[in-house]
Each structure stands twice: as structure tokens, then as C-alpha cells.
Image: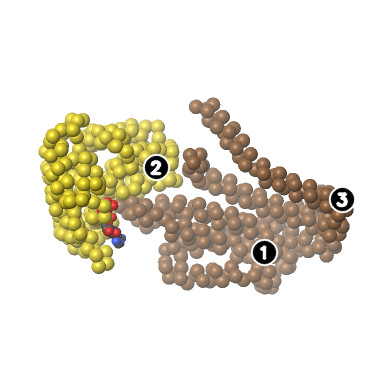
Chain colours: A brown, B yellow
């Protein structure tokens, strides 16, 4: 049994690895074309820096980049956490009280149509140049996908499962904890994944429009200095941080929903 | 044998349409009674009322002498689907009625675990429902129903997901287990053979709106022989039921 278990793990790991081969090859191809275009002199360096220059900029500015990353990441994660709590409260209220749903849903949608670039300076005006306006902007951009995911999850619950619970004498709270919440977890995590990918960008955009620290501030500085190699380095860094956040969400999902893996293995 | 459950003059409409009218059924202690009828005649509708999930337009449901009309949580009810919660391990699924009643998780698990062997579920305690076969899932749902019961259970097509071979095995098992645990059951089926093999009594629900048009006693003693379904007595019951269900209802 343990051996069988082990060989299955190895097989799963191999299959998981093979799944990523096309994407990795594709990325390598893009890097190769980029290298050819720039180092081959086809595109001038002031329009597109060569990957070598970008890597050099990344290495030479590494401590600064890490400092600013720490700030942006902190804003993103704090905003995300507050966003989760807020989304949760709103979704529960909207699920429980139909009037709440009618009152809040349109407002929620409106907050999503406001361009973040326009609202960021106003937030800075209200809250100063510190972290607060950045975190607020992250909250605004991240709570929506989570709230919608939770809400869809709550209302998509199997009515027969609710009937089963009622037939066993369960009250509203028990039905929520045992049926609604676990049934909504899948959609919650789908929403959280989208939100996680928005969160770093949200923080960076807010930093562009006022502040002294963070990757957005770094970006505006290097842009003013026309250091395109550093510009590209920071863009790639933001992509990497966002991907890491998404990976963290996926890990969390696997830990919280172990039954999903079972279903995967069967299909 | 005292009467444990009875329903009197149950009528239920959805909108303009009356689904069932003036239904009177009862269930005695330790009895297995079947409700037989074509699809859509209102069997599940009646069970939802008996279980207290829905209110009838008129009529009352009485459990052990006390009226329970519209009060869920008194009779255990196995719904038409097995409805194991995919995110709970089998042991926690089965122990759910105990935890709902406020028992702590560990204790509920211990109490449920005792029955796994008997219900043919040994070794599946910590699996998820997706890892079980259809028959195992139905047995797990059955065990959960048993654990939530205080003596009376409603089973809505408990063996419907099984093929004929598995079915007759599970019938044997079921009759065997019913002798060991004391449970009075009212169950629904489409399957005439199943109804005859398992029941002490059969109610025929037919017509539109659905009414109890016949009540057939299966006098065959328990434990019934394995080849009961091949005897002339069995065939004569079957003939009686087919006639009672009316023309065109043989293939239900
Ligand atoms: N909530 C509801 N609202 C409106 N009509 C309903 C509702 N529930 C059931 N019905 C109708 O009542 C009729 C009886 O349904 P019911 O589920 O009781 O049938 P059934 O005898 O259990 O059938 P089956 O054997 O297919 O499960 C059906 O025509 C169905 O469409
Ligand atoms: Mg039904």
C-alpha cells in the first residue's frame, strides 16, 4: 500500500510537471525572440531593452526592488485580507436578507465601474500619502470577485441538501455552516484567485498617484529617468509577485478543500 | 403492534393543481410498508409532508400520538438522492444527524463507527463520497437515516440507483438488518418486485390527483425465502398490484 501510494505520487508529480512543459517552452521561445530582436540590433535599445540589460538592472537594483516590493506586497495582502472580510460580511448579509441584497448589489456593481486611476488621487487627498489609500484601493478592487463568488455559491446551494438538513432538525445557523459555507468554498476560491491577481496591480496603481514607497513609486521614478531596463525589471517583478500570490491561493485551496483532489483522481 | 405514524386526510396542491387528495396512511411498529405509484403521482410530495418539510393544505400527521404536522426533525427521511455531502468524509456524513443534535464530533464519530461493519461500509470511514460505489453511497445514506431516527424512517426510492443483481443482494442485506435494528419504515419504490419482496403492506397511490386506491397485505412470513420472488404466491401478488395500478402501468 505505501509503495503503491508512493509510485502514484511520483506519477502524479510527473504528470503535473508535464502539464507545464508547453507553457515553459512558449515562454522560452518568447525570451529567445526578444533576445534576437534586441541583441541582433533589429529593435533599438531605447525602444526595447535587451533581456540581458533587464537582468542586469534587476541584479544591480535588487535591494531597492526588494524594499519597494515589501511595501507593495504588504498593501496588497492587507487589502486582500480586508477585502475577504468585507466580501464575507456583505455576502452573508445579502444572502440572509433579500432587502440587503436589493440595496447593496447595485452599489457594489457601481464601485466596480469607477475607474481606479480616477479614484486613487481622491483617496490620496482624503487619506494622505501613507499606506491607507493604497490599501483602500486594493480593497475596492478585490472584494467584488470574492463577494460575487460567495454569493453565487450561497444561492447555488442544493435545495435538497438543505431539505435533508431540515429533516434532521437543523436550524438556520447549522444549515449555513454545514451546507452553504462548504458549498460556496469552490466559488470563493475562484473569486479569491482573481482578486489576488488584481491586488498587486491595484497597490501599484495607487502608488503611482501619490506616495513615497512601493513598486509604483519606483516605477514612476525610473520612467522619469528613462531607465527602460529598470522599468522592464519592475514589470517582470510585479508579474512574478502576482503569480506567487495566485500560487499561494491555489495551495490554500488544496489545503482547505482536500475532497477536491479525491474527485480529480477519480475522473 | 402499535401504530407509530399516521397521516389523515392529507391534501396538497401546487398552485391550481391538486397533487394528492385525502390521503390516509399509517405505519405500525417494526413494519415495512411500501408506497407504490407511477412517476409524478405525488409520492415524494406526500413524504415531504410526512417528514414535516412541507405543510399540507389540510390534514394532519401524528407520530406516537403527538401531532407533528409541519415539524421537521422528528422522523428521519432519506431523500430521493443519496445526498452525501461531497466535502465530508463518510464517517462525518453518517454522523451528521448526531452532530446536528449537538453531540461533539468525536463522540458522534465513535457512535457512528459501530455500525460500519453491519452496513457493509467497513474501511470507508475516512474516504470521501466520490470514492465510493453507488451501492456503498446508498448504504451510507441509509446508515445516516438510521442514526437520525428515533424509530421511524421514510425512504424515498432507497435502492433506485442499483442494477438488478446488486439490488437483490441489498434486499437480502436490508431485510437481515431490519431484523436486527428496530425501525419502522415507509418506503417509496417504482419497482413492483421490490415492493413485494420487502414489504408487509403496500399502498397503491394512483390517479390525478393522487389517492390511495388500494392497500395490499403481503402475508408471507419473515424471514422470507430467497426464492420467494419465484413462487406462485409472489406472482399472484404481482398480478393483484398490476391490476390495482391500472392499465398501462405495468412498465413503471
Ligand atoms: N414544489 C413544487 N411546485 C410545483 N409542483 C410540484 C412541486 N413539487 C412537485 N410538484 C409536482 O407534483 C407532482 C408530483 O411530484 P412528486 O415529486 O411527488 O412525484 P413522485 O411520485 O415522487 O414521482 P417520482 O416517482 O418521479 O419521484 C409532479 O407533477 C410535480 O411536477
Ligand atoms: Mg419522487
Query: As drawn, is A56 to the left or to the right of A188?
Result: right
The residue that label 3 is drawn on is A40
Return the residue at label 2.
B92
- Return the chain for callout 3: A
- A103 lies above or below A60: below
Tell me the CA gap for discs 3 and 1: 41 Å
- Check mark 2 vs ligand 2: CB closer than 8 Å? yes or no: no
Numbered circle sitting on residue A180: none
Q: Specify the quarter for ligand 1.
A: bottom left
Q: Position of residue B156 (x, y in %)?
A: 27, 48
Report if residue B34 is visible in the image.
yes
Other residues around mark 1 within 10 Å, as few (<14) / some (14–19) / many (≥20): many
Question: Which residue occupies 69% across, 44% down?
Answer: A24
Please give the residue where the numbered disc 1 appears in the rendered image. A134
Disc 1/disc 2 C-alpha distance (Å): 44 Å
Residue B136 in the image, given as x and y percentages of width and height:
36, 37
Q: At 73% across and 65% down in the image, what residue appears?
A: A208
Q: Establish whether labels 1 and 2 are both on one chain.
A: no
Q: Is residue B148 left or right of residue A154?
A: left
Label 3: how many residues lie within 10 Å, few (<14), some (14-19) or many (20+)?
Answer: few
* Residue count near mark 2 (Cα–Cα under 10 Å), binned few <14, some 14–19, many ≥20: many
The secondary element bearing badge 3 is classed as: loop
In this view, the residue in front, A128 or A207, is A207
Residue that appears at 28% across and 46% down: B157
Amino acid at each position: 500500500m505505501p509503495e503503491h501510494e508512493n509510485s502514484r505520487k511520483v506519477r502524479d508529480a510527473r504528470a503535473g510537471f508535464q502539464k507545464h512543459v508547453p507553457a515553459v517552452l512558449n515562454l522560452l521561445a518568447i525570451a529567445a525572440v526578444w533576445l534576437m530582436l534586441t541583441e541582433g540590433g533589429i529593435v533599438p535599445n531605447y525602444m526595447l531593452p535587451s533581456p540581458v540589460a533587464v537582468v542586469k538592472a534587476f541584479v544591480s537594483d535588487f535591494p531597492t526592488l526588494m524594499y519597494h516590493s515589501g511595501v507593495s506586497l504588504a498593501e496588497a495582502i492587507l487589502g486582500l485580507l480586508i477585502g475577504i472580510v468585507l466580501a464575507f460580511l456583505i455576502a452573508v448579509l445579502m444572502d440572509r436578507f433579500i432587502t440587503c441584497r436589493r440595496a447593496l448589489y447595485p452599489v457594489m456593481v457601481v464601485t466596480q465601474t469607477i475607474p481606479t486611476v480616477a479614484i486613487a488621487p481622491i483617496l490620496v487627498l482624503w487619506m494622505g500619502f501613507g499606506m491607507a489609500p493604497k490599501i483602500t484601493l486594493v480593497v475596492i478592487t478585490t472584494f467584488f470577485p470574492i463577494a460575487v463568488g460567495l454569493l453565487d455559491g450561497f444561492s447555488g446551494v442544493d435545495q435538497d441538501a438543505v431539505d435533508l438538513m431540515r429533516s434532521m432538525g437543523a436550524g438556520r445557523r447549522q444549515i449555513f455552516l454545514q451546507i452553504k459555507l462548504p458549498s460556496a468554498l469552490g466559488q470563493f476560491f475562484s473569486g479569491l484567485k482573481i482578486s489576488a491577481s488584481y491586488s498587486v496591480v491595484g497597490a501599484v496603481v495607487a502608488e503611482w498617484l501619490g506616495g513615497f514607497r512601493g513598486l509604483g513609486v519606483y516605477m514612476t521614478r525610473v520612467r522619469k529617468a528613462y531607465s527602460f531596463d529598470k522599468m522592464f525589471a519592475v514589470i517582470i517583478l510585479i508579474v512574478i509577485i502576482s503569480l506567487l500570490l495566485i500560487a499561494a491561493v491555489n495551495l490554500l485551496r488544496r489545503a482547505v478543500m482536500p475532497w477536491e483532489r479525491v474527485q480529480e483522481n477519480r475522473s | 403492534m402499535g401504530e407509530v405514524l399516521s397521516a389523515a386526510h392529507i391534501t396538497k396542491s401546487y398552485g391550481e393543481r391538486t397533487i394528492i387528495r385525502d390521503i390516509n396512511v399509517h405505519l405500525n411498529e417494526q413494519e415495512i410498508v411500501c408506497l407504490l405509484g407511477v412517476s409524478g403521482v405525488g409520492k415524494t410530495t406526500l413524504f415531504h409532508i410526512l417528514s414535516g418539510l412541507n405543510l399540507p393544505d389540510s390534514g394532519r400527521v401524528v407520530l406516537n400520538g403527538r401531532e407533528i404536522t409541519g415539524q421537521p426533525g422528528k422522523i428521519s427521511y432519506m431523500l430521493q438522492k443519496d445526498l452525501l455531502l461531497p466535502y465530508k468524509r463518510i464517517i462525518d456524513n453518517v454522523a451528521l444527524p448526531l452532530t446536528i443534535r449537538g453531540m461533539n464530533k468525536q463522540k458522534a464519530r465513535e457512535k457512528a463507527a459501530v455500525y460500519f461493519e453491519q452496513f457493509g461500509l467497513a474501511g470507508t470511514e475516512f474516504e470521501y463520497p466520490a470514492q465510493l460505489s453507488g451501492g456503498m453511497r446508498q448504504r451510507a445514506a441509509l446508515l445516516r437515516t438510521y442514526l437520525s431516527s428515533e424509530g421511524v424512517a421514510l425512504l424515498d426510492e432507497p435502492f433506485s440507483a442499483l442494477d438488478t443483481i446488486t439490488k437483490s443482494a441489498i434486499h437480502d442485506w436490508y431485510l437481515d438488518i431490519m431484523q436486527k435494528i428496530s425501525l419502522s419504515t415507509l418506503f417509496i419504490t417504482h419497482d413492483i418486485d421490490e415492493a413485494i419482496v420487502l414489504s408487509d403492506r403496500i399502498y397503491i397511490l394512483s390517479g390525478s390527483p393522487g389517492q390511495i386506491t388500494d392497500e395490499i397485505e403481503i402475508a408471507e412470513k419473515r424471514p422470507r425465502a430467497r426464492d420467494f420472488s419465484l413462487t406462485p404466491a409472489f406472482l399472484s401478488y404481482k398480478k393483484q398490484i398490476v391490476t390495482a395500478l391500472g392499465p398501462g402501468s405495468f412498465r413503471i
